Image: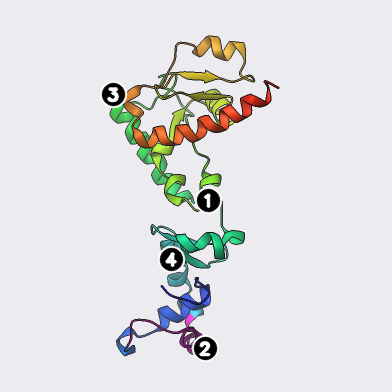
Amino acid sequence: MYHPDKKLNRNDIIALMNVDISGVNKDYLTKEELISEYKIANLISFESRKYNQIRYFLNFLKLLPGIVVSDDNEIAYKENAEEVLVKNIDTKRDQTLFGLMKENLFRESREFYNGKLVCYFTKKEQKGLVVSHIYASAEALKNLDVEAAYDYRNALLLEQNTDIYFDKHDLTFDEKGIPMFGWESTADFEDDNINNRLDEFILYPERLKYLAIHREIYLKKQKKFMK
């Protein structure tokens, strides 16, 4: 995709959807031709007639690797997005992609723990388990890393109390899954969980990469209490 602005907007998408590509002799449209095609689309009420298709297509673009769609429906390649879309990046969670991430994490738990959904830290089967991001999804989306935001390996299945400590970086894990308790973790929480750990078979390279990011933030927080 070449465009002098390094991005396409909603009007450009409508123009492209209205084009009969069999009548295009070259492999692209110029910016002026896009503007002209959008005017033609307006004359035939294309947007009002094809509203659902336009919305579907824009949502579909959000799923494509290497493509970033802003919250006001501007589209750019990932390598250009930070330059041309940074003020409009949508950091809100996409429920469809999060749902897929959740299902993959549940599948992983059932595969490793005899068909059960368990807290990866306590190994207890219980209701209300949380899909706890390791590298925060909002931060990943802010950095245009959609893959990390919805990668099930960027999450741990945790019971709610553990999730609170983990989310606030008052708990993290070393490369072998051994817990590291922070200054603001309570004595009761530490006593209850001192012998718990993450199993090494869930600590494959991708998850360790995300845990390294979490651990770095944890260590920065703990340093504040050491001054």
In three-dimensional space, the C-alpha distance between marks 1 and 3, rounded to whole angstroms, equals 37 Å
Q: Nearer the viewer, residue 76 or 12?
A: 76
Q: Secondary structure at mark 1?
A: loop
For label 2, the residue is 39
Foreground pick, 153 / 157: 153
Residue 173 or residue 126, whichever sits in front: 173
Q: Pointer 2 and pointer 4: residues touching (CB < 8 Å)? A: no
- Crowd rating for badge 4 (residues with CA inside 10 Å; few <14, some 14–19, many 20+): few
Which is closer to the viewer, label 3 or label 2?
Answer: 2
Residue 31 against residue 184 in the figure, above or below: below
Q: Which mark is residue 56?
A: 4
**Residue 28 placement: quadrant:** bottom left
The residue beneath circle 3 is 114
| Above or below 88: residue 215 | above
Query: Considering the numbered disc 2 on the image, is that residue within a helix, a strand or a loop?
Result: helix
Residue 219, label in figure: none
What is the chief secondary structure element of the magenta stretch? helix
Residue 86 placement, left or right of 197? right
Q: Which residue is mark 1?
A: 143
Specify which label sits upstream in the sequence, 2 or 4: 2
Q: Nearer the viewer, mark 4 or mark 1?
A: 1
Residue drawn 42% across the image and 63% down it: 61
Q: Report whether 92 appears left or right of 113.
A: right
The residue located at (39%, 45%) in the rendering is: 100
Task: State how far apart marks 1 and 2 are (Cα).
Answer: 35 Å
* Mark 3 burial class by Cα count in 10 Å: few <14, some 14-19, many 20+: few
* Camera-side mark, 1 or 2: 1
